[in-house]
Amino acid sequence: MVNVDVPTRDLTVPFLDRLAGLWRPFRNLGAARSGANGSRSLLTAAEFQEELAILGLSGRTFEPEDYSDALGDFLDISITVHVIPDSWYPELSRLLALSGRLGELRYSEQLNMAAIFVPGSLPPLVLTLTILHELGHLAAGDLLIEPDEPFEEDDQHAEQATFETLSLKKGKKLARGYPFARESLREREANLRASYALFAGCLGNDSPYALDMHDVL
Amino acid sequence: MSAAQHQALVLGSVSFVAFIFFLCFLLPSQRTKFSVFDACNLLFVALTFGAVALLDLSGGRAEIMVAVMTELPVVLIVAWVCLALAGGLPAQLGTLPAAPVARRPWLRAILMSAPFVLLLSVGLATTVGLVWPSPALRVYAPAPAQFFVWKGLIMAPEGFYSGLAAVVFMMAGRTPGLKRRIYFKNLTFSIGMVCIASIALESTVFAGLRVWLSGEGRRAILETLNTLEAGLAISCILAFTAGLSLRYTPAVATTLLHRLQTGWLRTQEQFESLEWQAVSSGVADRLTYASEAVVAACRIRGLSESDTQKALATIRLVAVMRDPSSETQHITPTAARKLYELQEEILCDDILASKISWAAGWRSRAHETQTVKSAPLHDALKAALELVDNHREGEGVKTPPLWYYIVAASAADAKMIDPAHLSMQLRDGAEHRAAVEAYDAARCALRRFEDHD
């Protein structure tokens, strides 16, 4: 689950909004060529391996901490993971569990930092995957989606191979493709990233995808 | 036989021998898309050089066309290699770039431009050659300046891209921790590409000497360079053949990995997170007291922390599986059995079982990890299924550990399971009596503690 702290606006914002409105058609013209406001399929394990290579983790065994550190360095943001013991906030686990969530990601564009909160009582595997899931949202650039771009959730085409994507405001992301317009797909892709990361981190250079990056012919 | 025909005969023979080797030895056992492409190119080169060796193709434009035909396979190989390194080949031929390229977008862009630049330069060179014909096949004949331009147009980009590819192969091979076979494979391809780059450089120098060098030593220098070119061509073919012969099969196949990601991991995560949600939100209300009693009984009997965790995980599972609420409806004995079988499948594979692990805690100082085998869930699933699933009574636990008896006593006391379903074999043993005693003592202690509060 993702929560974005939208920066507070001052008097210059309406002017900038209008300017952005004028600029948008030109920007979208260029973006359409590179995939923004276009469509793409879900992330594959091979594409994820490419992201790992960019982070310098391809072919290496790594833990979620290493992935978090490398991602933070690449995105030039500070990422902190807070594992909250149940004894500190006994209600946190209950409230998260009742809402059907396992963790929470907070991102502040102004402070250039992201914080992940997870309850300490999560089983170790779920804890690891939840942290990787939230890191996956950061890698995908899901937090950089323009807040003023409405999108109708439509489940009718859930099985299609490619899905609509959205444009982004200024910011850095690791993924090559743009975030999906549908939230359910963004969540699904974050789950995929988490499972790919877990296996890639465990297998290191025994991963067939890591091997493919050193054996191209 | 002219010098050109002699040169063509040598290169054609080498190419043909290499093609036969590919056909008989390499393709049946080590077939890749690139090796098939390479074999086709070798056949094409052998036929072209064969035609030059057998037929008298003298005449400006004819010589240019034949010379371009002999260069084309090399140009295509360089273009293919650059595209493969950049991850630009069509999906069915492989999409991943080489690791050093993935980190450098500028390098990727340069490598991706290879087919366009190379084919454009060949096209341009053909035009130049047809407009200003030159004796391209008469190896030692003096040539006009446009011959140097023609040769340079093909060789400069070919040399640049093959040199760049050689560097990338070398970088890919030098990655720390890489399998030795993959290291040597990249090394041989790098040598092969260095040979192509050297041939391009040598050919350009050769063309320049044909245009501008005169005097007595001219022929000897050109012959030496020609021999060097033949040697480089043979080395290049040998290097690529050796590289393609070196195959490495990964310990974990892509299909198996995909099955684990979509099968086991997804199932285990859903199972554990649903269980956590059920327990944390207090849905399984009988659980709190039972789990406290189980932990206390384990401590009374002096069980290890690992066994206590297994007992706790088991009582949780039994509570959640026996809870009729909608939140826990997905945690059924059937789902538990499916997960257990998936875990058993992983445990059958020694490599997977030892490699797939996850941290027991975030940034834990001890760097403790859990595996499918060591995580409490695996044994807990088996024990919970034994206690809950009445249909499997006959396959009961042969010699259950003490923690299992404690969980059984607790689950029966909390009415999670019917005590009658515990087999006589389990109820009559000394372990069972010891567990019941420990459980009763723990329950009394907890009651005293509650009364005291």
Image (tube, coloured by chain):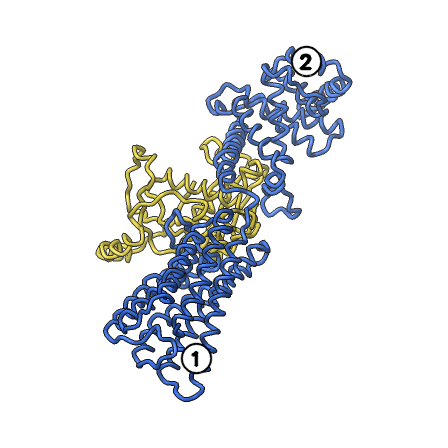
Chain colours: A yellow, B blue
The one nearer the camera, A175 or A47, is A47
Instruction: Give coordinates of residue B36: x percent, y percent.
Output: 42, 52
Q: Quadrant of residue B135?
A: bottom left
Q: Secondary structure at mark 1?
A: helix
The subunit letter for the residue under badge 2 reads B
Classify A205 as above or below A96. below
- In this view, the mark in front (2 or 1): 1
Instruction: Give coordinates of residue B83: x percent, y percent.
Output: 39, 58
Q: Secondary structure at mark 2?
A: loop
As drawn, the label of residue B423 is: 2
| Farthest-out residue, bottom | B215
Give the mark nearest the N terminus, 2 or 1: 1
The one nearer the camera, B109 or B50, is B50
Classify B35 as above or below B220. above
Query: Residue at image x 27%, y 75%?
Result: B133
Disc 2 to disc 1, C-alpha distance? 95 Å
Labels 2 and 1 touching (C-beta < 8 A): no
The subunit letter for the residue under badge 1 reads B
The one nearer the camera, A189 or A134, is A189
The one nearer the camera, A206 or B213, is B213
Residue type at the position of mark 2: Ser
Q: What crowding class fits label 2: few (fewer than 14 Cα within 10 Å), some (14-19), or many (20 or more)? A: few
* Res B365 visible: yes
Query: Residue at image x 49%, y 38%?
Result: B261
Instruction: Give coordinates of residue A29: x percent, y percent.
Output: 24, 55
Give the residue number, with chain letter if any, for mark 1. B222
Instruction: Give coordinates of residue B253: x percent, y percent.
Output: 52, 42
Residue type at the position of mark 1: Leu
| Farthest-out residue, front | B1
Classify A100 as above or below B85. above
